């Protein structure tokens, strides 16, 4: 079959296409975004009419994927690790309903927080939900595991969690494709109450899920993704989870590791394989990219006096992503870490694009707020979060998607006035609309700056669910027409925009200032595409 050079994300996307999915549902979030984007531009996916439209948020994506599974077809749902928090209600309950058509949930974790608020480890959610978890160590396994995850899902009638981390998502390797599997035909479950989680039904299905745990563990030992490699030096045994196995191999040029190694890429924990390693070695080193989840389990059920090394005892740093050098140091190897960065190079923190509409919006807001004390602008996740940095230093919070409006309500309840909530158009439809409804119902004295740049800019310019709908949504939620103000954030409009902010800051009710101007990046791409189309038309 064909061999392709693919990112880990792209390998998963191609694996899902070849596994016979009928749809992918997702909300863009680094490092998961490229999976859905790959499917959206794939000629294979287009020919197979695979549904691939961005969802309003991760919860709606998860629920839509469950609906596809309900109807008997295979679906992939993708998100980053913090997105799994948003989808958690539906995700946890999907383990109880089970799957009809194959259902695979992809969660891309971000150790070291390259573009995230925390380092959480999605394997915890898989263990919490009591479903199988797959964790590839390289791009080929990412492809193979995706295909296998759909087989596993349909074999046991359960969702399967596929967990990757940033380095695997965004690094390339050759990937060999296998024969394509046709899409399922629509077919409802033989049990039409399977997805009805009334307590009496849920109790029965929860017991069924518990009964499957031994089968899941047996499958983890038999599938071939968990492997035991014997060696002569029994002074140490190494357990390497997911991409950590790749990092372990990189420390030995010949690929010959002197210690016994257990490679773990499928969960639940293959207990018999772990016990086999534990019994034959003097000490154990656990390598995992993320939280010490496996290490904690190991200390729990094999606490028989042998020393266990890992993140919990400081052999591996507790925070941050794993890498080959960290693994090498933990093994006591000599590590070459390159040259120190010369002191003459100044740091270059991220910043808003030149000409970004957010710069003009926050410049006007800052001037309007000058008569008041600082610390009055609550915000959340989006490109505009960069306005927290110099030179703007305009916002004072960034907790999670949509938190700006609800935090502003709480601050207003505490007596802070005026208080501003700054949110983007895509984040508004993701999880800000309900907060605005709370504000209207409570008649909260807050000013909302709704930055409408007509795209999901932070993750690369994907379509925003709010496109050309923002005004109607704000009206529909109940904001008074007189206090829905639209400004064009341009330098030439600065004085006029400052005046709008000043007026609404004094209003002791809910006001929404919509700052509307297209993202400079999507505008540039759109104009370039138009030029290309004109040239082709002339040719």
Image: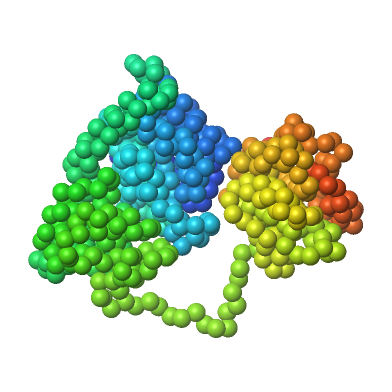
Is residue 519 toward the left or the right of residue 7 in the image? Answer: right
Percent across and percent down for residue 473 are 72, 34
Q: Nearer the viewer, residue 227 or 292?
A: 292
- The answer to whether residue 237 is left or right of residue 36 is left
Up the image or down, 181 lies above or below 249; here it is above
Residue at horizontal 54 percent and vertical 45 percent from the top: 28
Residue farthest front in this picture: 414
Q: How is the image coloured?
A: rainbow
The x and y percentages for residue 378 are 69, 55
Residue at 23% over, 65% down: 308
Residue 279 lies, in percent from the top left, at 11, 59
Residue 253 visible (yes or no) = no
- Residue 13 figure quarter: top left
Which residue corresponds to the image point at 63% horizontal and 46% vertical from the top-left? 402
Instruction: Identify the image quadrant of residue 363.
Output: bottom right
* Residue 427 figure quarter: top right
Image quadrant holding the C terminus, namely top right
Does residue 300 sit above or below 482 in this rendering? below
Quadrant, the N terminus = top left
Q: Where residue 478 sits in the image (x, y, percent)?
A: 77, 33
Say whether residue 280 is visible. Answer: yes
């Amino acid at each position: 079959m064909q061999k392709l050079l693919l990112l880990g994300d792209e390998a998963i996307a191609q694996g899902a296409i070849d596994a016979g999915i009928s749809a992918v549902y997702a909300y863009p979030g680094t490092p998961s975004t490229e999976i859905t984007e790959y499917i959206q531009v794939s000629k294979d996916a287009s020919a197979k009419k695979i549904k691939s439209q961005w969802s309003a948020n991760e919860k709606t994506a998860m629920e839509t994927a469950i609906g596809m599974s309900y109807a008997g077809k295979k679906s992939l749902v993708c998100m980053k690790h913090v997105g799994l928090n948003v989808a958690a209600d539906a995700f946890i309950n999907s383990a109880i309903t089970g799957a009809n058509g194959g259902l695979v949930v992809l969660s891309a974790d971000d150790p070291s927080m390259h573009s995230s608020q925390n380092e959480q480890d999605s394997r915890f959610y898989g263990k919490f939900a009591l479903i199988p978890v797959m964790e590839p160590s390289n791009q080929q396994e990412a492809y193979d595991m995706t295909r296998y995850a759909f087989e596993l899902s349909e074999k046991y009638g359960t969702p399967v969690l596929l967990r990757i981390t940033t380095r695997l998502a965004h690094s390339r390797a050759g990937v060999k494709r296998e024969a394509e599997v046709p899409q399922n035909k629509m077919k409802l479950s033989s049990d039409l109450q399977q997805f009805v989680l009334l307590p009496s039904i849920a109790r029965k299905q929860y017991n069924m899920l518990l009964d499957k745990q031994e089968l899941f563990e047996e499958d983890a030992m038999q599938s071939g993704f968990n492997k035991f490699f014997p060696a002569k030096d029994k002074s140490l045994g190494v357990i390497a989870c997911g991409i950590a196995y790749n990092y372990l191999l990189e420390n030995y040029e010949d690929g010959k590791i002197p210690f016994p190694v257990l490679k773990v890429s499928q969960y639940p924990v293959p207990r018999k394989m772990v016990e086999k390693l534990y019994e034959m070695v003097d000490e154990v080193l656990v390598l995992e990219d993320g939280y010490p989840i496996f290490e904690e389990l190991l200390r729990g059920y094999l606490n028989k006096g042998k020393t266990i090394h890992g993140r919990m005892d400081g052999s591996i740093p507790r925070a941050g992503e794993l890498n080959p050098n960290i693994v090498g140091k933990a093994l006591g190897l000599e590590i070459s870490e390159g040259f120190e960065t010369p002191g003459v190079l100044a740091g270059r923190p991220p910043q808003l694009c030149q000409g970004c509409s957010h710069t003009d919006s926050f410049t006007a807001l800052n001037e309007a707020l000058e008569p008041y004390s600082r610390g009055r602008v609550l915000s959340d996740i989006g490109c505009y979060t960069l306005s927290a940095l110099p030179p703007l230093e305009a916002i004072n919070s960034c907790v999670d998607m949509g938190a700006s409006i609800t935090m502003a309500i709480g601050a207003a309840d505490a007596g802070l006035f005026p208080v501003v909530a700054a949110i983007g158009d895509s984040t508004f439809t993701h999880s800000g609309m309900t907060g605005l409804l709370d504000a209207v119902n409570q008649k909260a004295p807050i000013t909302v700056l709704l930055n409408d740049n007509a795209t999901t800019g932070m993750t690369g310019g994907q379509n925003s669910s709010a496109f050309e709908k923002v005004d109607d949504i704000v009206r529909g939620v109940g904001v008074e027409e007189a206090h829905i103000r639209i400004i064009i954030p341009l330098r030439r409009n600065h004085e006029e925009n400052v005046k709008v902010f000043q007026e609404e800051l004094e209003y002791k009710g809910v006001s929404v200032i919509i700052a509307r101007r297209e993202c400079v990046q999507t505008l540039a791409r759109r104009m370039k595409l138009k030029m290309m189309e004109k040239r082709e038309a002339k040719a």
